[in-house]
Amino acid sequence: MRLVASFESLVQSLEGAFTAPTFRNLMIVVSGWVFASRRTITGMLVASGAHRSRRGQGRHYSTYHRVFSAARWSLDRLGLLVFALIEPWVGDGRVLLSLDDTLSRKRGTKMFGTGMHHDPLASSRSVAVMSWGHSWVVVCVVVRLPFAPQRWFSLPILFRLYLNKRSASRHGLHYRTRPDLAVELLNAVCEAHPQRRFHAVADSAYGGESVLGHLPDNCDLTSRLVLDARLHALPSPPVPTPKGGRPRKRGLRLPNPAQMLATRGQRISIDIYGRRNERMRLVSATACVYKVPKRLLRIVAVDPLTGSRPQQAFFSTCPEDDGVSILLRYAARWSIEEMNQASKSHLGFEQPQGWTRKAVERTAPCAMLLYTLIVLWFADTGHRFFRLPRLPWYRGKRLPSFADMLQTLRRQSVHDWVSVQLPDKRMRRNVLPLVFSAARMAA
């Protein structure tokens, strides 16, 4: 089964990251990845039809395993080529990035990089649950697309596999924290595009000194802050004294976010997280945090007046930002959670079974890169073929989900393939509905 020509041409723009034979094999794998029910390499070969080749005429199935386990290509270079495809949708302004980590559950002890990691889906506020698997740090480009102008999309481009201390020691590697890996990813994309300005959005795990104090020069950060954070003014210029001594590293102590909320604030009403007219009380100020005393931040403390959300605090490394723009920018971070769920549920991010280092570090990220390519294809071409389902329980549905985008790609690929096999228009008109109906029942 071949994919629709418009999607293949999009994938062809990434050919520069591979040799010609590797890219030819990769196209077969991608075709199977879209149609397979289980995303193992052999499952993809079955879905693409490559396993039907007669003896002596086709490639051995191990050839497709070696695309990920042995072929010479760089995942970072591939991700930067994908970023080039996203750039036309970003425009000439500041590029918004989202940053987070996600767990890929695995089984077995011989697979490279596995270890025990915190499982946020199985945990509760009172009980922390650990699961065996891989932990990935991911950087995405956050964009709005014309077919859904009110919705943010996080499109993954760069990845790092996090190894806990025991796993790093077992493989003889230097241990690096998730924030260290996040800074490495930010440096990779910022150094590749020094003329652009980036702004990363991340949760509190990436809002500490380990990221805030090591940001690239052309990158800013918006993140959460604890309510009792120690805040200071900028240090005053050193004044010579008769006794000498070390000048102050920090300025005067300022109220923390909880103390800021004890004062009179501004009452606002905004549309955020898909809810309309959320009322809240907002207090903002400029200050420096204790561990990074020379970087001035815009601090925003929020007390929601509707709903059950607790008091929260946020910061931005752009002191000129206003409080509402910081809240709306941080809300765009939720799109990376939607991307994580879609990549696992619909593209099998957790299913590849490779166990060597190269196979592990390459195969699963390709599921997220495929997510990016499918969304870009839908924004450019696929939305013209999409029709809202006529179902009684979807009367209020207005925008396509990622499942709809994937189904549209499959449907158009099948349509083009059947059209080639049946050149007669009348026969095609009669056969296509039967094909789609049978495919839905088989799925």
Image: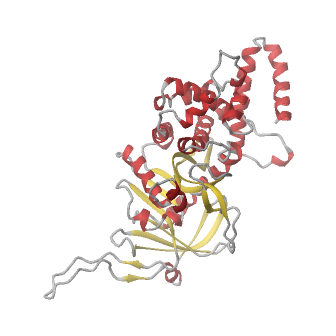
Q: Is residue 398 left or right of residue 326?
A: right
Q: Residue furthest top?
A: 424
- Residue 185: where, in percent of width, then height? 45, 51
Numbered marks: total: 0
Q: Is residue 31 left or right of residue 245?
A: right
Q: Is residue 349 above or below residue 81?
A: below
Q: Residue at x 81, y 47 (%)?
A: 395
Query: Could you tell me if residue 398 is visible in this image?
Result: yes
Q: How is the image coloured?
A: secondary structure
Q: Is residue 116 above or below residue 366?
A: below
Q: Residue at x 69, y 17 (%)?
A: 55
- Residue 346: where, in percent of width, then height? 70, 43
Query: Could you tell me if residue 332 is visible in this image?
Result: no
Q: Residue furthest bottom?
A: 243
Q: Is residue 258 above or below residue 76?
A: below
- Residue 252: where, in percent of width, then height? 34, 82
Q: Residue at x 38, y 47 (%)?
A: 196
Q: Is residue 380 left or right of residue 19?
A: right
Quadrant containing the N terminus is top right
- Residue 82: where, in percent of width, then height? 50, 38
Give the camera-side residue of 154 and 353. Answer: 353
Indicate the quadrant where residue 4 lies.
Answer: top right
Q: Residue at x 50, y 31 (%)?
A: 14
Quadrant containing the C terminus is top right
Give the camera-side residue of 369 and 425. Answer: 369
Indicate the quadrant where residue 221 lies.
Answer: bottom left
